[in-house]
Image (cartoon, helix red, strand yellow):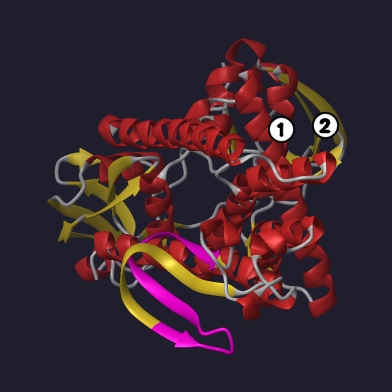
Amino acid sequence: MSNFLILIIAFIVAISVLVAVHEFGHFWVARRLGIKVLRFSIGFGKPIWSRVAGPDQTEYVISALPLGGYVKMLDEREGPIAEADRGRAFNQAPVWARLAVLAAGPAFNFLFAIVAYWALFMLGVSELRPVIGEIEADSHAGRAGLVAGQEIVSVDHAPVENWQEANLAIVDDLVDDGIIKLTVLDEQGEPREVTIDAVADKRRLTEPGELLNGLGIYIVPRNTPPIIGEVSDGDAAAAAGIQVGDRIVAFSDTPVDNWIDLRRYVEAHPEETVDVTIERDGSELTLPITLGVTRRDGQRVGLMGVVGQDPPGARPVEVSYGPVDAAVRAVAMTGEMTTFTIRMLWRMVVGDFSLKNLSGPITIAEYAGETARLGPEAFLSFLAIVSISLGILNLLPVPILDGGQMVFQLAEAIKGRPLSAETELRGQQVGIFLLLMLMSLAIFNDISRVLSG
């Protein structure tokens, strides 16, 4: 199956699952509170499948455009209702019940993330200790005194256990004032406080893919020998006959001295057929290889389907937990990702965090395809992160979103009567404008990444 087809299928699956979860939250709570649901739709546009079922004869629909969904509830503002349904319309429910229905969609997105993380922690996750592989001498990290082999144990006095946690904590500390405070252990296990001054470069470092290398920190040493540690089934290297333990010597007439050379060459030659020279069992062998293609950070890059041998200290560790510990960690992870996302959104508003981090459907589709290709663990983790983002987005106080509708309900509770139809209409218009502006910026970022590739 081609990478593009995997991307499309993964994107549709991801959006459909997360929209179904969100809308089911509205649907489930509305039904429990006695509000009549007329339609439950996944997608927009022309229905491609529908079924009417249940005591309320609810219409369940899958529509042609899988980019959203909705739950349509009985509402007397949209037309007369039967006497038998009196009191079951959404607008006739108490304010607290309407708030509960509106909040249920985002709440189910957060609940989905907890369940996804719980499953991941139960099945086992690969964690990479935050051990520094290499420090660029003339860099922010080099001037601060960091050296290869040190392990980061805390960022701004908050403990970190793996590179994912370290990345998030470093970004969080950076956007405050451009100063990053680390505690590291040297190779003798002695703790040391290090302060990185990146004030002059703070904005650039918050752009996608710029953080660690921009600071001068490399997880894997750049001079790592190009020895194959793993070959992905179905990708270019496997088709060419490359095996674990082979050392890449050259591509055509271009010598390869380290893993950085290999990566640069492969990424610069998507879908090209070249000769690869390998060293196997003391002998050299030349094989033809047709490199694959994928998208990374909006750019079209070559793909070989190999992983290098892990240097000491940079070997992933498989960690799993029992049901209770996994649940505790899942709740904590969801909370941490939620608060981090909210803080970074606010930092975008005040200008401390690059707006280039705002991603649209193209980037989401690329990550969906890439994580699906990497396997169920990566794809489920991707779904959890996007589900959290979807929950937060819908809680923004923008009238067209759940959060904005909740503001309308609270205003009614304070005034003692519903807002006028004109006020709600104006609010909806403002909400649509703001949402279009947000979507336009996200799509602009997507297109800029594509064109830059």
**Residue type highlighted by circle 2:** Asp
Q: Secondary structure at mark 1?
A: helix
Q: Residue sitting at 59 percent across and 61 percent down?
A: 76
Left or right of 60? Residue 200 is right
Is residue 59 one of those drawn in magenta?
Answer: yes
Q: Which residue is mark 1?
A: 172
Cα separation between marks 2 and 1: 9 Å
Q: Earlier in the sequence, mark 2 or mark 1?
A: 2
Which of the pair 16/309 is nearer the observer?
16
Q: Residue sitting at 58 percent across and 73 percent down?
A: 37
Q: Which residue is mark 2?
A: 156
Residue 411, located in which quarter of the rendered image? Answer: top right
Is residue 276 one of those drawn in magenta?
Answer: no
Tell me which secondary structure the magenta stretch mostly adopts. strand
As drawn, 375 above or below 192: below
Residue 25 visible in the current orientation:
yes
Q: Secondary structure at mark 2?
A: loop
Q: Residue sitting at 54 percent across and 33 percent down?
A: 426
- The span picked out in magenta is 51-72
As drawn, 250 above or below 51: above
Query: Are circles 2 and 1 on residues that touch, CB within 8 Å?
Result: yes
Residue 85, located in which quarter of the rendered image? Answer: bottom right
